[in-house]
Amino acid sequence: MKKVMFLLLASALCLTALTANGKKDAGSASDDGVVWLEWWNDSYELPAMEKDHFQAQDLARTLGISFTSPQGTWNGGAQYIQDLQLRIVSGDMPDIFLPWNGIEYDLASQGAIADLTDYLPKYAPHIWESVPRDVWDIVRANSPDGRIYYIPQVWDNMANMGMIRQDWLDRVGLDVPTTIEEFETVLRAFKEQDANGNGDPNDEIPLSGREALRWWDHLWAPFGVALIEGYPEWDMYNGELTYSAVTPNMKAAVTWIKHLYDEGLIDPEIMVNSKKIWMAKITADQVGTFFYNALWLRDNITDARQINPDFKLSYLPALKAKGYEGFYSGRSYRRPDICIANKSEEQIINSLKLVEYVNSPEYIEHCAQGFEGYNVKVVDGKRQFTAPDLNRRAPFFGTVMESPEIVNTKYLKYIDDPTTKYLTDQLGRILLDSQSRVIAGQILPVSIYDGYPDIKSHKLYQEYVTQIILGTKPLSDFDKFTELWYKQGGREVTDRARKFYADFLK
C-alpha cells in the first residue's frame, strides 16, 4: 500500500507541475485584489466556507489574503483523508490542510509539501516563538530529514475529560464520584431513578460513547491505561515504553467495563453510535456521563437547555481503582496541524502569512467579539451575542496554541446571552478543572508502523476488546489478543518505538 501511495504522490507532483503552467500561480492575487487560498481543516463536517462567508470577507478586507474551505464527511477522519488523498492524486492539492493518519511523512519525502524550516521565523514569527522548542524537536524527529514540514498543534494544560450531569446527581442525591465503586452507585441511580426529571424513569442512559471504542476513555483511565480519543497509546509500564493495549492494566479495565456493560449501565448501542447519534443523545437529555472535550461542546449543547432548563455539567476526575494510578491521557504535542502545499514560493509565503494572522492574539481577540449575522445581533444600535447560526460554518482561528486561557478568550470572554453564557461558563470551568498526564509516546513518529498497517489502525485491539465486552468472546481471549498482537508485528513495532524513544532522549 505504501509503494502505491508513493507512486500516486509522484504522479500528483507531475500533474501539479503541468497544471501550474496553465493557470495563474497559486497564492497570487485574483481579480478582486485578494489572494484566495483553499484550507482544509477539522471543521470539514461543517457547512462549506465560500468567498461570501463572513470570516472569508473579514480576512479579505483586513489582510488581503483569505480562504475557502469545503464541506465533507469527517467520520473520525477516515472519510476526510480519503477525500484529501483523491485531491492530492488529482494534482490539485489544497494550499493549506490538516494532515491525517501520518500522510505528512510521505508527502514530505516526495517534496509535495513545503519545507517550512527557513520560512517560519520570517513569515510566522508569533507561531515560531509560541511553539516550545521541545515540540519543534518532536516535529523534526517526525520528518524524513530533520526539517520542519508542518506546524503542530500544542495543548498547554488542555486535555479531553470525563463529564457528568450535575443536575442528575442533585436529583438522585449523590456527589461527583471519585472511585469506581462510587461511580457504579451513580450509574445505577441514573438507570433506576428519574434522573432527568421528565417523569419517565426508563429513558435515561447512564453512560454513552461512540463506535469503535471511541470516546469512553474515562472507563479506562482508572486503571492507568494510556488512551486518547479511544486509541491506545504508548506510555511507560514497568520502566519500558509499551503499547497500552497489551498491558495488564488494559485487561483490568476491560474486565471492569464488561461488568458495567453486562449490568446494563452502558448504552446498549455504544458499539454502533456515530458521532451524530451520540451527540444527539447527549443534547436530548438522555446521557448521564460521557467523555469529550468541553471546548468542542460549545456549539453542540446550546439546544440542551431548551429540553431541560436545569442542564448542568461537572468535571468528572479520573476515578480511583485500588492498586492502580489512574489518569486522563494528554499530549502537549497534540498532532500535526497544518501542512502547506509546495506549489510556489509566493503561495507558501501567503499561506504562512494567513496562518500567522489567524493565530495572532489580536485576531483571536477580534473573532472573540463575534460576527454579526452569525452569533451577534444589533439591537437599538448595541451588539448582543446570540446562539450561533449552526447553518453557517463557525469562524476558524487560533488553532495552533490551545490553553484554558486562550479558550476563555476565544469563546467565553464576550458572551452575554444568558442561555449561552449559562452553558459556556460551565465548559470554561470544566476546562480549568481538568487534569491530565502527558504520555511518553507523544514523540513517536508514524514510521514505527511501516509495514504493519493493522497495528497502526488498532484493528486487532478493536476487534478483540469489542467482542469481549459484548460477550461474543470470553475474557480469557484477551491473552490470545496480546499474543497475536506481538506475533503479527507488535514485537517489531515495539522494538522500533523503544529505540526511537531512547535515541530521542539522548
Image (cartoon, rainbow, N blue to C red):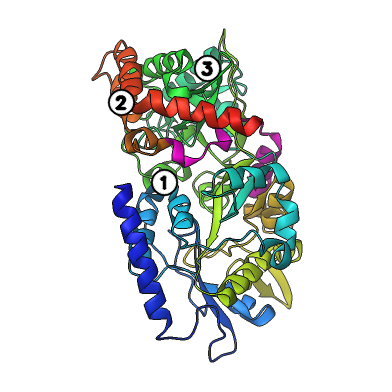
Q: Is residue 302 above or below residue 382?
A: above
Foreground residue among 499 and 384 = 499
Amino acid type shown at disc 2: Gln
State the residue position of label 2. 488
Q: Is residue 397 magenta?
A: no
Locate residue 317 relative to residue 483 in the image: left or right.
Answer: right
Amino acid type shown at disc 3: Phe
State the residue position of label 1. 280
User: Mark 3 Cα within 10 Å, few/some/many (few <14, many 20+)?
Assistant: many
Query: Considering only order in the chain, which callout, 2 or 1, is on the residue closer to the N terminus?
Result: 1
Tell me the mark number nearer the camera, choosing from 1 and 3.
3
Q: Position of residue 283 (x, y in %)?
A: 47, 45
Query: Considering only order in the chain, which callout, 3 or 1, is on the residue closer to the N terminus?
Result: 3
Dot 1: element: helix
Image point (52%, 43%), residue name: 308
Locate residue 165 relative to residue 117 in the image: left or right.
Answer: left
State the residue position of label 3. 223
Q: Quadrant of the C terminus?
A: top right
Answer yes or no: do the residues labelled 1 and 2 have beta carbons within 8 Å? no
Q: Confirm whether residue 379 shows in the render.
A: yes
Which span of residues is magenta-colored? Answer: 423-448
Tell me the mark number nearer the camera, choosing from 2 and 3.
2
User: Mark 2 Cα within 10 Å, few/some/many (few <14, many 20+)?
Assistant: some
